[in-house]
Amino acid sequence: MIKNFKWLLLVSLSFVACNNDDDIATVVEEPVTSGTANFTKYVALGDSFAAGYSDGALFKKGQEGSYVTIISQQFATAGGGEFKTPFTSDNVGGLLLGGNIIAGVRLYFNGTAPVTVSGTPTTEVTTKITGPFNNLGVPGAKSYHLVAPGYGNVAGVASGAANPYFARFATAPGTTVLADALVQAPTFFSLWIGGNDVLSYATSGGVGVNQTGNLNPATYGGNDITDPTVFASVYSSLVTNLTANGAKGVVANLPYVNTLPYFTTVPYNPLTAKVLGGGSEAVGQATIAALNAQLYGPLKQALNAFGAGDRINLLSTTVANPMLIKDESLVNLSAQLQAAFTPSLGQATATFYGSVFGQARQATAADLVVLPTQSAIGVAPTASDSGIGMAPPSPLNKFGITYPLQDKHVLVPTEVAEVKVATDAYNVSIKTIADAKGLAFVDTKVIMTQLSSGGIVSNSFTLTSAYVTGGAFSLDGVHPSPRGYALIANAFTAAINAKYSSTLKQVDLSLYPIVYPAIIK
């Protein structure tokens, strides 16, 4: 009754104001309220997205524009308290450990391509900063890291047992991210975690192990896929602890990696005649003729004999050609190729050809070429990255053209499927637990899919996942741009409003740029 009277009073006052002066219309804005939520003490748990990581680094300006920082600013208008962030020391990015650089500086766009900014990192990991901090986003963190004692122990950073970002601000060497959240007695929390449980595997090109079936994360490698049962158990523990004292919150699911520009920017088929000719169509056509006669033709002929002729096709002079890649999911035909080539090439050379092309094929649209591979195409393999322990001789010394790109360069369909299966399983757990605990839910999978398939219109801007020009992602191809983080913040506040009947405002995307300049003041 009192609430209804308040609104009747506002309406009547507006009516009187309009009737007192026909030329001035008073627009009554809806007051900002917290609804059934309590934003007094907000803590944010997550990974690099919560931290504000952007352009390949963590730096102060990026942290100021993280989606959780933007959310906290909206909370402040509805009773929210101080939101403390463990800021880095500069806008250059990168980290030092005992004076040695262990993480590189950020990227910026010089008008032609992304390049690193000038300067040296000044953020020293061993220099502890005083908390506790509300923003507990930790770049590189996987789900189980949030409950791992010692993850913030400086002594473990050099060996990889601890995280350098968390080590700067953990309240104690043996604490956990979750413990540092709970000690603050939060009244509201956000949790967006799980991306790195598959992303590190994906960004490495599948150089890692799918640990599905292994319930002991202590045995996992840095690029491994987390077992879905482990994820579900950890996630349930996180949410149960965070809500134990009545705190409300908002959680988010995970997008598919193939919606990120890191996996969609480099085409699988960039080899046109002009590219192969170094800009000359005529040279390219001659190059293609030579490659078909000396390499692709003999390979296809030999593979045809083993029922695998579809792995290699002759290069075309009129359309863009796919790159050569190694696919470890294929049957290895090294021995068969060695036997086929020995009569004409001799045993030593035939053995070499067999080892190089035993699992080679041309890429297809189903392969995801990772962003760093762009700089490897046509480059000579070295002993360390050739996969055979030696630098191959000419003419088999051009990645993607005469020498197969390796596992780290491409996410092949079997690896894409592994990532998708795990992501789907994580998302089921996230939604189920969110519903069970009555939490607000953000479907970032839908958001990222929209960005990669036409874009999202907001504040008269159309944001897409196109690399550099799309406006939603930063130059590392994984993390959002400033405007992308604002878009995500708006999605979070919309979900909070819907769940808790709060009336938080949306931010204006025009206030957030799509790229950071070389020098940030």
Image: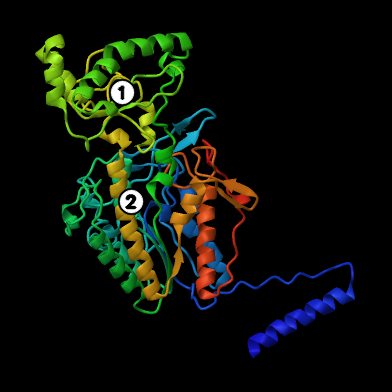
Give the residue type that dot 1 points to.
Answer: Phe
- Measuring from the top left, give residue 81's x and y in whole percent: 50, 70
Q: Check disc 1 and report the residue beneath it.
A: 399
Along the line of sight, the residue nearer the viewer: 253 or 35: 253
Give the left or right position of residue 454, taking residue 381 as reference. right
Along the line of sight, the residue nearer the viewer: 17 or 348: 348
Q: Quadrant of residue 401?
A: top left
Q: Is residue 292 visible?
A: yes
Whichever of callouts 1 and 2 sits on the residue coming sooner in the sequence is 1
Against 340, residue 8 (above or below) is below
How many residues crowd around disc 1 within 10 Å: few (fewer than 14), some, or many (20 or more)?
A: many
- Measuring from the top left, give residue 289's x and y in whole percent: 36, 11
Which numbered dot is residue 139? none
- Secondary structure category for the residue under label 1: loop
How many residues crowd around disc 2 within 10 Å: few (fewer than 14), some, or many (20 or more)?
A: some
- Measuring from the top left, give residue 28's x and y in whole percent: 73, 72
Which numbered dot is residue 420? 2
Give the residue type that dot 2 points to.
Answer: Lys
